[in-house]
Amino acid sequence: MKKGKMMMVVVIFMFMAMFVPGMTMAGSLEPSAPPGPTMRTLDQVRAWIKVDPATRFVDNGDGTVLDRETGLTWTKNASIIGTHTWDNALYYAYASLTVGNRMGWRLPTVDELASLIDSSQSNPALPIGHPFINVQFYYWSSTSYASNPAYAFGVGMYSGGYVTYNYKSSAYYVWPVRGGN
């Protein structure tokens, strides 16, 4: 019986020596895997803080607009590459677009696109004083609909703004973005 108790004490001691220090000194709360389409890292959440609406958007004078609230750079022309199916939208935003002497544009996530919405506004549902031009009715996001991969999310910019999903084979507008993760 004494051997069993001694063995239990050794196991408990080893457990505490190996795991407890790591638990008490766990530094980062960041997830170990990259975020999924609806999950944001702590840095992203911290970065999306409200700024003065009058200075939220900065027109860079080169066809791009910086959103100081999210740190993302958008094309000033909100319909710069027209309408495309979802697959084509992914391709055209990334591979064939140069704005402000920069390539590397992409479709925004549904969270990023919806961050532009000011639901107190309509036609378009963007903050008062925004610098964007050619804002259209509905835009693709890069976020697929998990329950059915034939669909992807998009954001409507009229009627107070809304988020919904549509068939990826449908053609909708593309509003390219740069920055973020």
Image (cartoon, grey):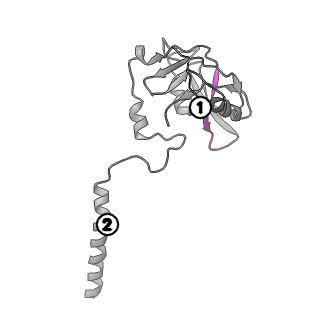
Residue 71: % across, % down: 45, 27
Location of residue 39 in the rendering, given as x and y in whole percent from the top left corner:
49, 41
Say whether residue 125 is visible: no
Amino acid type shown at disc 2: Met
Disc 1 target residue: 106
Q: Position of residue 89 (x, y in %)?
A: 67, 31
Residue 136, picture quadrant: top right
The magenta segment is: 136-147
Q: Residues within 10 Å of mark 1 (few under 14, many from 20)?
A: many
Q: Which mark is residue 167?
A: none
Looking at the image, residue 148 sits to the left or right of residue 159; the answer is: right
- Asked if residue 9 shows in the view, the reply is yes
Mark closer to the observer (1, 2): 1
Question: Disc 2 marks which residue?
Answer: 18
Q: Is residue 148 left or right of residue 43?
A: right
Q: Is residue 157 magenta?
A: no
Residue extending furthest front?
A: 101
Category of crowding for the residue at label 2, using alpha-carbon neighbours closer than 10 angstroms: few (below 14), some (14–19), many (at least 20): few
Q: Quadrant of residue 12?
A: bottom left
* N-term-proximal mark, 1 vs 2: 2
Q: In front: 141, or 94? A: 94
